[in-house]
Image (spheres, rainbow, N blue to C red):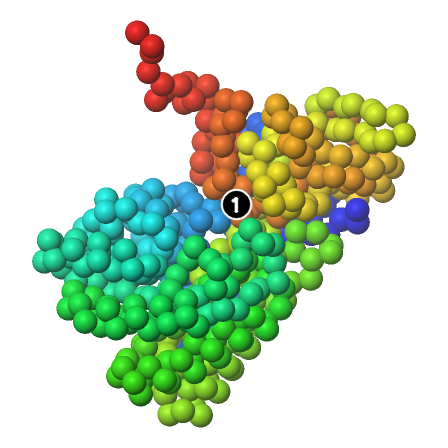
Amino acid sequence: MAFESFGTMRVNEVGHLEIGGVDTLKLAQKYGTPLYVYDVALIKERARGFKKTFEELGVKAQVAYASKAFSAIAIYQLMHEEGLSLDVVSGGELYTAMQAGFPAERIHFHGNNKTRQEMEMAIDYGIGCIVIDNFYEIELLAEILREKAASVSVLIRVTPGIEAHTHDYILTGQDDSKFGFGLTNGQAEDAIKRVLAIDVFHLIGLHCHIGSQIFETTGFKLAAHRIMEQLVAWRDTLGFHADVLNLGGGFGVRYTADDQPLPPAQYVREIIADVREVAMANNLDMPEIWIEPGRSLVGEAGTTLYTIGSRKEVPEIRSYVAVDGGMSDNIRPSLYEAKYDAVIAERPLEEPGETVSIAGKCCESGDMLIWDLPLPKSDAGEVLAVFCTGAYGYSMANNYNRIPRAAVVFVENGEDRLVVARESYENLVQLDLPLH
């Protein structure tokens, strides 16, 4: 493959891959591999870009980091410094956010099956908004609020009946989805009526999310248009005014040269244009717009470093090159058939001399990171840098085969900072209990 850089990535004076002003070989030597490396400057650039677009358009907004993409204390603190809000989907993410000192009033809690304990945590912490996903949650949350003599701002998640062009496993906006209230089957209207009738709720608006890794704006625009037209109808029939319209995330990123995502600002501009058009045509107040970028903030900022190990030649069929990680640190190729590009960090500009398939070390035939990757002839001990692993790598990491989770390092302006330590073998057994 031809070397295509992300963010501050470059080839330095000695010919090595460098990120954030730091030689990746030095990072591998200092922290070991596998190693997640995050380009902090690129994350900041993306965060500021989203906020600037709303400011230029004169639209009141919140940009909330969808933290399922990568959850850790340091990334939450970085998002707080950049003035973003936070989207969490579990008690664990919420607890991590509070440990990071993230302002509770800027936290939004999602999920299709929030437990009583998680909802009680959210209320006790005083978070800014809970996104109600189903009828069960309406009753459970109302019961908890009454017990605590509390109230909370809520959004109702709707599925607008729009199918995004993406992988079936990550479609969430069509009618047949485990998420939200159907807009076209009357469930959303029923939910609004119920919530409006319960005094412990402050219904501030609606939420939708049509999918992930989306490369065009059509789906977003259709969803926004459909919901806005429905808001006009509900204003007239229910007296319901939405102060907030949360249009979710799902903005695509470039994993390989085959991916052609739009600039993040283009998604925002076209969505806003449709919302404004319906609002102005129907004398409807322009709602505050919330979005939830996750992958598009951190995906391209992450690179995983591996050490190359064994090689297997299958004559006239395939050459396998194995690395010291795999589905334990990046399960997406096995789960979604996700595609990635990579280079040898010692010599990223060298022309490919062979085509190999990058195998992980887990005891599964399906543990393959990259099929048919053009590379220079590699040697054991060299470092392979796999690009665009900042989203859903660490957050979906696991201990299959009792492999410890990898470390995470932030790099910026020539400095590196360890933000998640590598798990040890002692960590692996710390929760185990003996048979006798």
> Could you tell me how many numbered marks the image carries?
1
Percent position of residue 107, x then y:
32, 57
Q: Locate residue 159: give its quadrant.
A: bottom left
Within 10 Å of disc 1 (Cα), the crowding (few <14, some 14-19, many 20+) is many
Q: Is residue 126 above or below residue 48?
A: above
Residue 229 sits in quarter: bottom left
Q: Which residue is mark 1?
A: 392
Q: Which one is nearer the viewer's eye here, 425 or 382?
A: 425
Residue 81 visible in image: no
Furthest-right residue in this view: 316
Give the answer, above or below, for where 381 lies relative to 188: above
Q: Is residue 137 visible?
A: yes
Which residue appears at 51% of the width and 82% of the height?
273
**Residue 399 x, y percent position in the rendering:** 49, 28
Q: Nearer the viewer, residue 426 or 346?
A: 426
**SS under mark 1:** loop
Camera-side residue: 361 or 139?
139
Residue 287 in percent (x, y) is at: 37, 79
Residue at 61% of width from left, 32% of height from top? 326
List x then y, in percent, for residue 427: 41, 22
Residue 30 as seen in the image, left or right of residue 96:
right
Give the position of the C terminus as an image quadrant. top left
Q: Residue at x 30, y 70 (%)?
A: 190
| Relative to 339, residue 287 above or below | below
The image shows residue 373, relative to residue 113, as above or below, that is: above
* Residue farthest to the top, as pictured: 436
Q: In the image, what residue type sits under mark 1? A: Tyr
Residue depicted at 61% across the width and 58% down the height: 166
